[in-house]
Every structure is written in structure tokens, then in C-alpha cells.
Image (cartoon, rainbow, N blue to C red):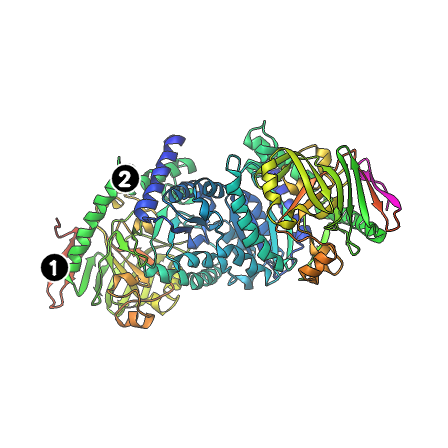
């Protein structure tokens, strides 16, 4: 790709982000969260957004190096400080029903070598002072998550290449996974979205009471709440705008019942937790709780993470992705949830989306949990799918139907 | 300079910024930003990283960086809806206010593109500028009172370097500008901290002399300039160091060569000519003259950028008046470099200058706690703006006029006309 071709691709990617991802409306304001290394893409997004009639494109720039310098040098008792304005910034946009774009291109090895205890203090503070207070603004903005081939991330994905070559290769993978290399990316997305909506509608009609997963190292049954709702591709927000919240997206997902998970599940891909990798791990569930786990790498970090609060050990999401998804077929381990979760069936520790339960959007936490929804400060996806995975849907009467066989959809629409 | 040597100079520079400029205390938070670009330009990251390390090593509680991207401003002007330019995000103000209201330190880093908004619709630029200044005013109020230890330093940004050295390629221009910055902030010295101690003492002796004299007015004469400027009772001559209200002694500008105070907002008479171009809001204003009557600007003319100058003066009532008068010898190390920096932090330290707009509260005895009305009653000026412009040259003479009307030379041929110990 020469510079001109790359620039043209970047513009198409920005257009897909603004038109399909955010579905940005005229006169909305847009808050972008990205790394300082993302500037070339963010400028294209700003141009596309202003052309679509945005009143203001504001960027919450993050510099990971300053973050690392802090964890290396600052006094431990200061690591739980979070400036007030970080929350106020989101509130300022959320209250108006503006749009929000998050760019996930973090250095997966950012915190390598930093003591786990220091990372944990910082992470807990971010959950308590940012993630949790922001829950009350959930779904007030049309939002979208995308990624750019930032240098540190690219080098992690392609460690044997020069930084520049790694970035080029990662950009190609991103453009392919996001259908930017098709003749009309916006049209390709409309078609893809319709297909995911078809799977979602099929599953919603079935009203399964549980899913049964079977694969090497995995024999897991996950109950579904009576009022569970399957989602795919699109979401409609409180400001009335329907948007495609993840670019790329290949998944159809709902929430599990927080008290109903039994058996063993083995991860098929490493889990990247904000700079720390957890690899080769299995988890055993009883009555919905993870009661035992082991990991070849990062076991202590996973243990700390799941100790964040009481319900971090319960599940909050179950997602279905065929093994033939373009991301899975690329064979690349992205070390980035946005991509890796779309390569594989996955489940998530921690918080469930209220929108995954019929009427959940307007429910109190108490009503939500009474119906089986999980509430936690964390929401951490991990990958369990493979070409060897079979999934059955279990009906209320105990009858079974095939959902996935050998990692692929077992029904046709 | 090798990559390694450059990194080492950045490290030393960061140490001077944290120890001499901010004099950061253990337990303070530090916020780093730059108003004009709505945050620190992204390309300044290498210096920001060194400053963050130095600050945490000095015991900083938190180093909070507000980033801004220069390129987004012209992009917005080109593509955003016509009626949207007063939109502003309040959080970037709150991020800084949160610190200056709580006794924490503030660092601003200049060095962005001086021509960033040049050639764009001046109406839109002015609406955007106004929306910004109206909010930023809440921060300026605290800075003007020296509420906390604050500091202004420079980074050799690419576009800025090319503006100064237009015949060089970007890399060479930046290298040359870095050399100028490192030398003028004395980080090329064997012991930069010691060099600063001595320089600060020299400037203080000049300020003390002017303070003892208690002049009632200054008279400027130079080609195109015949100008008398009143000094209010209680004016304080300030140099390098100041004592902030949070108890920290700091050096607000790196580099600094000036000795300055506030003029009486109602007493300026005559004509003053600029001796350097003024870069304001991304537009360059050149060869301009300003005429005063009773302290008020009654006429401006410029060979280039007159509309921008007119807009600046029309911002509010206070921008028709002056808020600072500063003395800098024509032989200052920055003037000796014989080129324009297109940046006030440097150019103001190359030449005597005055500022359109608000006065620093700390340049008036007891000025910090005063209300705006009280401050103005004592001769202090208030405005959304504070814009320095250069008037000094080797042909400038300045007299101090005593209360009894007698005159004493302050500068002759652009140089100090008195001796200090």
C-alpha cells in the first residue's frame, strides 16, 4: 500500500465508523477516545463527522507512556487517584445524548514488569471512579468501538517484523476484518448486519433455557434467564439512534443466568487484561460461580482481577461466533478483545448488559439480579470457541437442538 | 546532536522546568496543557514524558496531561456547520481549574504552529477564539493572581521551527531551534541549576532598583515611537521569580530576561510602533502602530494583518488598554540571536514590550485579593486578552519620570542606563 492508497483506505474506514458504526446524526457532538498515536485516523474521523454535520468533535487523548511512567514512579498511595474531570467529560457528552467513539489500540504489553499489586490498585480505582459511575449513563449515547494499528500493538501482534512493517500488516488485517477492502464498504456492512440480525431473531424465537458447550477441555452448561434477549450487530440507544457498536462485529450475544453455570470451560485464546496476558487457563463453575481456575501464565493477575468484587466470578455474557468468521480465518491472534472476541465463541466474567434482558434497561439493580442478571465492576470476555466446539440449545422441556457444530452455525435461516 | 545526546538534553531541560520553573513540591499535582491548541500538542510527547518522570521523582501526586491536536482546529473551521463554532467542551477548563483552585501546579508548553489558522475565515476564527477565551478566563484569573506555581516553557514544534528557519528542512530546523531553546534556558551549561540561581539574582537587582525609584511614568522614544505611560501607585516591579499564593516560589517563564510591572490603565499618551511582528491567533501582524489617548487605544494601523489587530483590540473594553510594561535590554541573549522566534515567550525576552489587555494582579501591591472593580480603581486593567507586543530596539531611549516631574535615564540605546551591584 503506498501512502495515497493508505490514505484512501483510512478515509473509507472513517466513513464506515461515522456512518455505520456511530450512525452519527446532524448536529450531534462527538467525543472520541483514542491514543495520541491514533491521530491520523482520528483526523479523518473528525473530517467525516463534520461533513455529516457534527457540531463539535472533541478528543479525549490518552498517552499510554505517561500512564506507565506513573505506575513506575508514583507513590503507591497515590495510584488510586482519578481526576474528577475524566468522569465529568463523559457526563458532559452523555447528558446531551451526544455520540461517543472509542478506539481500542492499547499496547497489550504496556504494564509488563510493573508489580501486579500496583496495577490492581490503579485498575480498581478506574472501575470504582469511572466505570461504575458511568453505568447510569449506559446507552444514553450512540457509541462505537474501532481500532487502529498503533505501533506497540502492531509489534505485539507481529513481533518478528519492524514496527513499520508490523503496522502495515496490522492495518491490512484491520481493513480486511472491517470489510474496508470491499468495493463499497458501507453497502457490505448493511448486508452483513442483516445476516447477524437474522441469527439473533432465530435464537430469540427459540427461548432456550440453557446452552450446552462441548469441546476438548470444555463441558459446560450455562442457564439463560427467562427474559433473555439475543442481540447482534445493532443496538438502539436512548437518544433514538440505532448504531453498530463494534466495528468489526461477528457475534450474536445475550446474558447468562448468574446462578446457573455448571462444569468446566477451557480458554482457546490468551486473555489480554489491560496490558497483562493470561494464557492457557481453565475455569470450573458451580451454581454460576467460578470455584476453581488454573492458568499457565498470569494466574495471579486473573485471581486479583476476579477478586475485584463478589460477582466478578459470575458470568455476564455469552456470545456465539462461527469459526469461519474472517477474523478467525486470518489466523492472527490480535491481543485485542474487539478482534479476538469476533474470532471465537466467548463468555464474559462480571457485569451483564441490562439491554440483554427484556425490559432490563429500566430495571433497578435489584430487579435485574432477581431475574438472573449479574452486576459487577468488571466485564472481561474470554475466548472458548474452536473448530471442535459443539453447542446445543436446551429447551424448557429438556429437548436439545443443535446451534453450532464443529464451530459453525448448525441451522440455516 | 545524536539521538542519545538530545534525549539527555531533554532530561536536563525537564529537570530545570520542574525544579527552577515550577519548583514543584512533593505532594503537589501537576497539570500540563496549552490553551491555544486546547491541550498540549501531541508532538510534544517526548518532553512531556521527561517532565512526568522528573515530576514524579520530585514527589508529584499526579501528573495530568491535557492533550490537544493542532490539526483538528483548522479541520473544524473547514468542515463544521457554520453555526457551530461557539460549541466548546467545558471539561478541558475544569481539568485545569481543579488544580489551580487546589494549590497544585500548572505547566503550559508553547511551540505549536504559529500560522495554524492563517488564511482561514477570520470571522469563524474570532468566534472560536472568543468561545475559548471566555472559558479560559476562569483559569487566567487564577494565573494572573499567581494562585499557584505555574510555568510557561517551549518545545521545538516542527511547523514553528520551519517558520523560523524557512530555508532548512524540518529536521534541521527543529535541531537548530532545539539548540536555541537549550541555550536560552541554560541547559547547555555545566550546572544549569547554578546558572539559573545567578541569572535570577541579576534580574532581581534590576527590579529592586526600579522598585526603589517609584517612578510615576515612563517615557519611550524611538523611531515611530513617542509615548508616555503612567505607573500606578503601588506598582511592583517583578523579575524571574514570584511567590505564589500557595507559598511556592517559582519562575513563571523559561527563558526569562525581563523586568516588568503594570501600567496605569488610564494613563497612556502618544504613539508606539512595533519593532517585531506579532503572531496572534494564528495570524501574523507586521509593522504596526498604536495610538493612545487617556490610556485607550484610539487608532491602529498595520502593513499586514490590520484586521486581526483590530479584532484583538475590539475583544472587550479592557483590550483597548494596556496591562503590562516590560524592560529587556537589546543585548539580551535572545535578541543576540538576530532572528524572530514568532513566539511571545522568546520574542518578549528579546525586546522591551507592552501588553494589550489584562494586568497581572501580583504586579500591584495588594492586588491579588481585590475585586475587578477595586483593581481597576487602582489603575489595573482587566480583559479576556493579554497579548504582548515588542517595541524595543537599539534605538530606544526610556526615561523614568518622577512624581516631581524630574527625569532619569532608565535605558539608552536599548541598554540599561544604570548600574547595579
Please state if A377 lies on the left or on the right of A252 as rendered: left
Residue at 67% x, 52% y: name it.
A19
Please indicate, yes or no, whether residue B118 appears anywhere in the rendered image: no
Residue at 14% x, 60% y: name it.
B213
Query: As rendered, which of A393 and B408 lies closer to the eye?
Result: A393
Query: Which structural element holds mark 2?
Result: helix
Estimate the spatial distance between the alpha carbons at disc 2 and disc 1, rounded to whole Å.
36 Å
Residues at circles 2 and 1 in contact by the CB criterion of under 8 Å: no
Residue denoted by label 2: B192
Camera-nearest label, 2 or 1: 2
Residue denoted by label 1: B408
Across and down, in percent, residue A18 comes to: 64, 51
Residue B208, located in which quarter of the rendered image?
Answer: bottom left
Earlier residue among tags 2 and 1: 2
Please indicate, yes or no, whether residue B187 appears anywhere in the rendered image: yes
User: Over which residues does the magenta segment extend?
Assistant: A399-413
Please say if B172 is above or below A192: above
Magenta-span inclusion, residue A412: yes
Please state if A119 lies on the left or on the right of B370 as rendered: right
Across and down, in percent, residue A200 comes to: 79, 50
Amino acid at each position: 500500500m503506498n501512502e495515497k492508497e493508505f490514505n484512501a483506505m483510512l478515509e473509507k474506514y472513517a466513513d464506515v465508523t461515522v456512518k455505520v458504526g456511530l450512525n452519527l446524526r446532524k448536529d450531534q457532538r462527538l467525543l472520541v477516545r483514542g491514543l495520541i498515536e491514533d491521530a491520523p485516523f482520528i483526523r479523518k474521523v473528525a473530517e467525516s463527522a463534520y461533513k455529516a454535520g457534527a457540531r463539535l468533535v472533541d478528543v479525549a487523548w490518552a498517552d499510554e507512556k505517561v500512564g506507565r511512567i506513573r505506575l513506575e514512579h508514583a507513590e503507591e498511595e497515590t495510584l488510586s487517584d482519578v481526576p474528577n474531570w475524566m468522569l465529568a467529560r463523559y457526563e458532559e457528552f452523555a447528558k446531551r445524548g451526544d455520540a461517543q467513539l472509542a478506539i481500542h489500540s492499547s499496547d497489550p504489553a504496556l504494564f509488563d514488569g510493573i508489580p501486579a499489586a500496583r496495577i490492581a490498585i490503579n485498575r480498581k480505582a478506574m472501575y470504582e471512579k469511572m466505570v461504575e459511575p458511568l453505568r447510569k449513563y449506559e446507552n444514553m449515547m450512540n457509541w462505537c468501538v474501532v481500532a487502529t494499528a498503533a505501533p506497540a500493538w502492531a509489534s505485539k501482534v507481529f513481533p518478528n517484523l519492524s514496527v513499520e512493517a508490523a503496522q502495515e500488516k496490522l492495518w491490512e488485517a484491520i481493513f480486511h476484518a472491517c470489510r474496508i477492502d470491499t468495493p463499497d464498504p458501507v453497502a457490505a456492512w448493511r448486508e452483513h448486519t442483516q445476516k447477524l440480525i437474522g441469527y439473533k431473531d432465530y435464537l430469540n424465537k427459540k427461548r432456550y433455557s440453557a446452552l450446552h458447550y462441548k469441546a476438548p477441555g470444555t463441558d459446560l452448561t450455562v442457564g439463560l434467564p427467562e427474559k433473555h434477549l439475543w442481540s447482534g450487530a445493532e443496538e438502539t440507544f436512548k437518544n433514538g439512534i440505532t448504531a453498530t457498536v463494534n466495528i468489526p462485529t461477528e457475534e450474536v450475544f445475550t446474558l447468562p443466568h448468574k446462578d446457573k453455570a455448571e462444569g468446566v470451560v477451557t480458554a482457546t485464546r490468551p486473555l489480554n487484561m489491560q496490558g497483562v496476558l493470561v494464557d492457557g487457563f481453565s475455569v470450573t463453575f458451580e451454581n454460576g460461580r467460578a470455584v476453581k481456575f488454573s492458568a499457565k501464565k498470569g494466574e495471579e493477575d486473573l485471581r486479583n482481577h476476579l477478586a475485584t468484587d463478589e460477582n466478578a466470578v459470575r458470568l455476564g455474557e455469552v456470545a456465539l461466533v462461527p469459526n469461519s468468521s474472517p477474523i478467525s480465518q486470518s489466523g492472527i491472534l490480535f491481543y485485542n478483545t474487539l478482534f479476538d472476541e469476533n474470532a471465537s465463541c466467548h463468555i464474559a466474567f462480571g457485569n451483564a448488559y441490562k439491554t440483554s434482558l427484556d425490559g432490563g434497561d429500566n430495571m433497578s439493580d435489584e430487579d435485574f439480579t432477581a431475574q438472573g442478571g449479574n452486576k459487577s465492576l468488571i466485564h472481561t470476555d474470554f475466548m472458548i470457541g474452536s473448530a471442535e466446539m459443539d453447542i446445543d440449545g436446551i429447551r424448557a422441556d429438556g429437548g436439545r437442538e443443535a446451534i453450532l457444530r464443529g464451530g459453525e452455525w448448525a441451522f440455516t435461516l | 546532536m545524536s539521538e542519545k545526546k538530545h534525549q539527555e538534553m531533554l532530561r536536563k531541560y525537564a529537570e530545570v522546568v520542574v525544579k527552577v520553573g515550577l519548583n514543584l513540591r512533593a505532594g503537589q499535582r501537576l497539570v500540563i496543557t496549552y490553551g491555544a491548541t486546547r491541550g498540549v500538542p501531541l508532538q510534544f510527547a517526548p518532553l512531556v514524558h521527561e517532565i512526568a518522570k522528573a515530576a514524579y521523582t520530585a514527589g508529584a501526586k499526579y501528573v495530568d496531561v491535557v492533550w490537544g491536536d493542532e490539526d483538528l482546529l483548522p479541520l473544524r473551521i473547514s468542515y463544521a456547520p457554520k453555526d457551530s463554532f461557539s460549541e466548546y467542551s467545558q471539561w478541558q477548563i475544569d481539568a485545569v481549574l481543579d488544580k489551580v483552585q487546589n494549590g497544585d501546579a500548572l505547566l503550559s508548553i508553547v511551540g505549536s504552529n504559529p500560522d495554524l489558522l492563517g488564511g482561514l475565515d477570520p470571522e469563524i476564527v474570532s468566534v472560536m477564539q472568543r468561545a475559548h477565551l471566555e472559558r479560559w478566563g476562569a483559569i487566567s484569573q487564577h494565573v494572573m493572581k499567581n494562585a499557584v506555581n505555574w510555568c510557561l516553557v517551549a518545545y521545538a514544534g516542527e511547523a514553528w521551527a520551519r517558520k523560523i528557519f524557512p530555508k532548512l528542512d524540518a529536521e534541521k530546523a527543529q535541531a537548530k531551534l532545539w539548540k536555541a531553546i537549550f541555550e536560552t534556558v541554560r541547559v547547555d551549561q555545566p550546572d544549569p541549576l547554578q546558572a539559573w540561581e545567578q541569572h535570577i539574582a541579576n534580574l532581581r537587582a534590576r527590579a529592586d532598583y526600579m522598585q526603589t525609584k517609584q517612578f510615576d511614568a515612563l517615557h519611550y522614544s524611538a523611531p515611530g515611537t513617542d509615548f508616555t505611560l503612567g505607573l500606578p501607585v503601588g506598582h511592583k516591579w517583578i523579575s524571574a521569580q514570584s511567590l505564589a499564593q500557595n507559598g511556592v516560589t517559582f519562575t513563571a517563564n523559561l527563558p526569562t530576561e525581563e523586568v516588568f510591572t503594570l501600567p496605569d490603565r488610564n494613563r497612556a499618551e502618544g504613539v508606539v510602533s512595533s519593532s517585531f511582528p506579532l503572531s496572534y491567533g494564528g495570524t501574523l501582524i507586521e509593522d504596526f502602530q498604536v495610538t493612545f489617548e487617556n490610556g485607550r487605544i484610539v487608532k491602529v494601523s498595520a502593513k499586514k494583518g490590520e484586521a486581526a489587530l483590530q479584532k484583538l483590540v475590539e475583544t472587550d473594553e479592557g483590550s483597548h488598554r494596556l496591562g503590562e510594561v516590560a524592560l529587556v535590554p537589546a543585548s539580551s541573549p535572545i535578541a543576540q540571536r538576530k532572528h524572530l522566534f514568532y513566539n511571545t515567550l522568546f520574542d518578549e525576552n528579546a525586546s522591551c514590550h507592552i501588553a494589550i489587555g489584562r494586568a497581572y494582579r501580583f504586579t500591584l501591591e495588594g492586588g491579588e485579593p481585590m475585586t475587578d472593580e477595586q483593581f481597576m480603581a487602582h489603575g489595573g486593567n482587566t480583559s479576556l486578552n493579554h497579548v504582548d507586543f515588542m517595541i524595543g530596539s537599539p534605538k530606544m531611549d526610556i526615561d523614568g519620570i518622577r512624581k516631581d516631574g524630574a527625569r532619569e535615564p532608565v535605558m539608552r540605546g536599548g541598554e540599561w542606563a544604570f548600574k547595579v551591584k
